[in-house]
């Protein structure tokens, strides 16, 4: 089964075209699926629309009464996915703002089934691209990815900041069992959780791969939710936490994970 995770905040204009494309893609696959959407305190018609979609889709809604941010939405979505998934399932997480085309789901699923734990939709893989991204934003994005590759190197990975990913359910269940509430620890620091998840998964030995995709920022009609200064601060905090010489993530979690593996074998 595929478990589709979607964080949503004020996406009443984006949902109709996205859900039409998602339905077409999923119906073409020979896979059972379940959609879990976290409505993060939307003040438009997002909740009402999701309730309507739940009448025709296998769709579950997690509702936040106030906007809590991407970190807490992601935490709730992944904890729910770990709870309802079996080891044979694949978890797909992508955005609700119609910038992530569902047509890439089959190639992501294929890569996961080939033995990869995490498969990232990458603008920087040959064949990938981005549309509607201005020169400044493109420069910031590429600079951020270079920064992440330097401080959090993962062999073969070019795309660190895109949230469109597929996960073997086993690795998510293992991560949440090991890290607990600290799987997504930096919940209040903007989009930092997108990087934090792959760093935490790398620590426990996840195998990564990428598939090329086109980021369609030209299709985005809702306002951007990213606060660049807050996310940049989050990245810097992560560098300190990961590389801190006295029990930082890189050394501290690895020691704890070895003990956890022995205990849980």
Image (tube, rainbow, N blue to C red):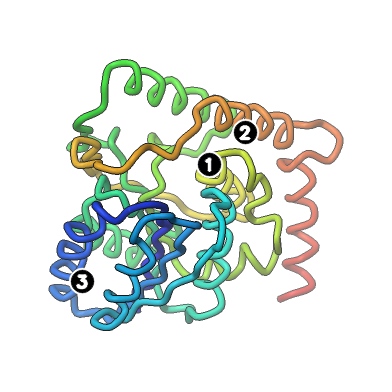
Q: CA distance from mark 3 to mark 1?
A: 27 Å
Residue 251, percent from left and from top = 76, 42
Q: Residues within 10 Å of mark 3 (few under 14, many from 20)?
A: some
The residue singled out by tag 3 in the image is 26
Q: Residue at x 51, y 40 (%)?
A: 191
Name, please, the residue furthest toward the right: 246
Q: CA distance from mark 3 to mark 2?
A: 35 Å
Q: Residue at x 47, y 54 (%)?
A: 207
Q: Is residue 102 above or below residue 125?
A: below
Apparent side of residue 240 relative to residue 216 in the rendered image (left or right): right
Q: Residues within 10 Å of mark 1 (few under 14, many from 20)?
A: many
Q: Secondary structure at mark 1?
A: helix
Residue 107, percent from left and from top = 23, 58
Q: Is residue 77 above or below residue 12?
A: below
Residue 121, percent from left and from top = 31, 47
Q: Secondary structure at mark 3?
A: helix
Place residue 8 in its image quadrant: bottom left
User: Which mark sits nearer the N-terminus, 1 or 2?
Assistant: 1
Q: Secondary structure at mark 2?
A: helix
Q: Residue at x 17, y 37 (%)?
A: 127
Nearest the viewer among 181 and 110 is 181
Q: Residue at x 44, y 56 (%)?
A: 42
Place residue 248 in its image quadrant: top right
The residue singled out by tag 1 in the image is 195
Residue 152, percent from left and from top = 57, 34
The residue singled out by tag 2 in the image is 234
Disc 1 to disc 2: CB gap under 8 Å: yes
Q: CA distance from mark 1 to mark 2?
A: 10 Å
Quadrant holding the N terminus: bottom left
Q: Residues within 10 Å of mark 2 (few under 14, many from 20)?
A: many
User: Which mark sits nearer the N-terminus, 3 or 1?
Assistant: 3
């Amino acid at each position: 089964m595929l478990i589709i995770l979607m964080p949503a905040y004020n996406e009443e204009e984006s949902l109709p075209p996205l859900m039409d494309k998602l339905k077409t893609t999923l119906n073409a696959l020979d896979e059972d699926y379940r959609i879990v959407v976290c409505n993060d305190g939307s003040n438009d018609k997002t909740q009402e629309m999701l309730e309507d979609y739940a009448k025709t889709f296998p769709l579950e809604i997690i509702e936040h009464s106030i906007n809590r941010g991407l970190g807490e939405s992601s935490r709730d979505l992944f904890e729910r996915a770990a709870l309802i998934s079996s080891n044979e399932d694949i978890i797909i997480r992508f955005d609700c703002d119609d910038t992530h085309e569902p047509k890439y789901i089959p190639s992501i699923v294929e890569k996961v089934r080939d033995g990869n734990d995490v498969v990232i939709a990458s603008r920087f893989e040959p064949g990938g691209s981005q549309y509607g991204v201005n020169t400044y934003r493109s420069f910031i994005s590429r600079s951020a990815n270079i920064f992440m590759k330097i401080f959090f190197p993962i062999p073969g990975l070019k795309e660190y900041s895109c949230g469109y990913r597929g996960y073997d359910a086993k690795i998510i269940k293992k991560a949440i069992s090991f890290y607990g509430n600290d799987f997504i620890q930096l919940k209040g620091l903007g989009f930092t959780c997108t990087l934090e998840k792959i760093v935490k998964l790398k620590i426990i030995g996840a195998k990564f791969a990428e598939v090329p995709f086109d980021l369609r920022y030209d299709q985005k009609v809702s306002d951007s939710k990213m606060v660049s200064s807050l996310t940049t601060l989050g990245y810097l905090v992560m560098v300190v936490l990961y590389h801190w010489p006295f029990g930082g993530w890189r050394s501290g979690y690895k020691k704890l994970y070895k003990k956890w593996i022995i205990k849980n074998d």
